Amino acid sequence: MLVIVTLVAMTFAGAAGAAVIGEDDQVTAGKMAADALIVRPLGFVATVVGSVLFVVALPFSALGGNGSEVGQRLVVDPALFTFKRPVGDL
């Protein structure tokens, strides 16, 4: 159930990001508001869910030798997207 909710949230985050990205790269108040109210909270959810999935997948990824890649994709990338970029920079 949690995976389904996360996938739906990530879909809406992509749609919200696409809706506020105009043809120019100028950061507007609308982009900042959409980022702060929609995209960042969904990014935080993706980071938390990715962390849980990473812990579940860790034994298997360790056996496969790709633990760092799994951690990068499931935890680090969503965290960087959520916490390291400027507000409104979609």
Image (cartoon, grey):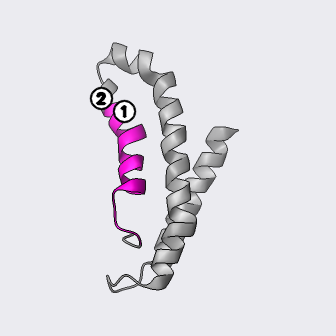
Residue 2 picture quarter:
top right
**In the figure, is residue 79 to the left or right of 48?**
left
Please name the residue shown 42% across and 78% down the image.
Answer: 21
Residue 33: percent from left, percent from top: 52, 76
Magenta-highlighted residues:
69-87
Q: Can residue 13 be seen in this view?
A: yes
Q: Which of 85 and 13 is in front in this view?
A: 85
Tag of residue 71: 1
- Secondary structure at badge 1 equals helix
Give the residue number, with chain letter if any, for mark 2: 68
Q: Distance between the residues labelled 1 and 2?
A: 5 Å
**Mark 2 residue crowding within 10 angstroms, few (<14) / some (14–19) / many (20+):** few
Residue 49 picture quarter:
top right
Image position of 42 with respect to 2: above or below = below
State which quarter of the image contains the C terminus: bottom left
- Secondary structure at badge 2 equals helix
Please name the residue shown 70% across and 38% down the image.
Answer: 1
Q: What residue type is labelled 2?
A: Ser
Residue 79: percent from left, percent from top: 40, 47
Q: Is residue 12 located in the magenta-colored stretch of the structure?
A: no
